[in-house]
Amino acid sequence: MNTTVHTIRIAGSEVSYPAGEGDNLLRAGLRAGIGLPYECNAGGCGSCKFDLLSGEVEELWAQAPGLSAKDRARGRRLACQCRPLTDCEIKIRPAPAYLTPTPPGLFEAEFVGSRIVTPDIREFRFRAPPPASFVPGQYALLELPGADQLRAYSMSNLPNAAGDWDFMVRKVPNGRVSTLLFDALRPGDRVRIDGPLGLAHWRDDTDRDVVCIAGGSGLAPIVSIANAAALQSSTRRPIWLFYGGRGPADLPSFDECLHAASRVRVQAAVSDPQLADAHGWSGERGFVHELVARNLAGDLAAHRYYLAGPPPMIETLVRMLMVEHRVPATQIHYDRFF
Ligand SMILES: Cc1cc2nc3c(=O)[nH]c(=O)nc-3n(C[C@H](O)[C@H](O)[C@H](O)COP(=O)(O)OP(=O)(O)OC[C@H]3O[C@@H](n4cnc5c(N)ncnc54)[C@H](O)[C@@H]3O)c2cc1C
Ligand code: FES
């Protein structure tokens, strides 16, 4: 086994950390307890941009959308898409805000089984050495047998002593990794988990209403957060869960997903009128941000928000909350599913 370890130095500071051969520049730093900036770990958001001052790295996805043409011209790179090949000196600005209560690790887990949530979402369970330590709302990167790329999936369960890591995954047509999960993975198969990661996690400081909002595959983290709020919260403030799907078939059974369903005020809407008519849908229609605006009365700036789903949905929601309702950015936590 190759045990080469490279040293990554952060320019202008005394900080350095080790990265084993083949490890990821960003996640090796986070595992070493250094608050390197990031959001998605998927090459989409650009938060982890850095300058390479010396040394060599392998870029895993040179065309990642998180870098603009200007960034590339300036030689900038994404830490989540680089592996160090030598010792390196990098320019990046760490901050304690990027550290989470449970430090990330790298470990193996066994696929135990799955259940149907909607026609195109399944919940997959993996068992790792206990405990399963994470904060509700966080995600992990899964490395599947036969996959040459990692993908981020949010945990849908709560931290637990059994070592269970549950993920609700939407099957993407021709998607490289989600197709493997649905069609090729067999109980007993082993995967590698890199996590927990992510900053859009549950905060139990609730002198505020908890408002969880998701569309499509954003279901997993908001179910986990709503369950944490209902079961663990130190207060009895209202908990809202808003969910949007294209048609009625895209809506899960919230009674099955929520442990204390009576504590959570669920509102769901469908956005495709033809699918709504075809199923005789008599509930709410429209996009999830419209659903929130219609149903959340009073001072929207008083609540704490957790959002998960496709980037355009999140960007519309954040704009609506911050611009129209003056919700402070510190009360909005989101993961964009690039
Ligand atoms: C923080 C976060 C949390 C997420 N949580 C969930 C979840 O809980 N449930 C869920 O269903 N989905 C989730 N996703 C989306 C998920 O990670 C996958 O994008 C989705 O499953 C599609 O992957 P695929 O391989 O099937 O499809 P593909 O179409 O093959 O891949 C799509 C994604 O892969 C990435 N990608 C494309 N090319 C490359 C490359 N060359 N190198 C590296 N990456 C590449 C891009 O991010 C792209 O959006 C999350 C994404 C993020 C960022
Ligand atoms: S964290 Fe690297 S691009 Fe999002």
Image (tube, grey):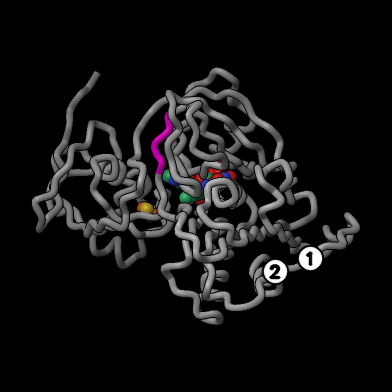
Q: Determine whether 247 is above or below 69 in the image.
A: above
Residue 271: give its label: none
Q: Which residue in the protein does label 1 denote?
A: 284
Amino acid residing under circle 2: Leu
Residue 283: x and y, percent?
82, 62
Secondary structure category for the residue under label 2: helix
- 19 or 300, which lies in front? 300
Crowding near the residue tagged with mark 2, few <14, some 14–19, many ≥20 C-alpha atoms within 10 Å: many
Q: Mark 2 and mark 1 in contact (Cβ < 8 Å)?
A: yes
Q: Is residue 272 left or right of residue 156?
A: right
Residue 172: image quadrant is: top right
In this rendering, would 54 be left or right of 32? left
Magenta span:
192-196
Residue drawn at x 43%, y 29% is 131
- Residue 140's place in the image compared with 14, above or below, is above
> Quick one: label 1, few (<14), some, or many (20+) residues within 10 Å?
some
Closer to the camera, 159 or 86?
Answer: 159
Task: List the residue tagged with mark 2.
Answer: 291
On whether ligand 1 comes within 8 Å of the CB at mark 2, the answer is: no
Q: Is residue 146 visible?
A: no
Q: Residue at x 43, y 71 (%)?
A: 329
The residue shown at (62%, 50%) is 219
Which residue is more in the foreground, 159 or 219? 159
Taking 143 as reference, is 15 left or right? left
Left or right: where does residue 261 sit relative to residue 138? right
Give coordinates of residue 143: x percent, y percent: 45, 32
Lower position in the chain sequence, tag 1 or tag 2:
1
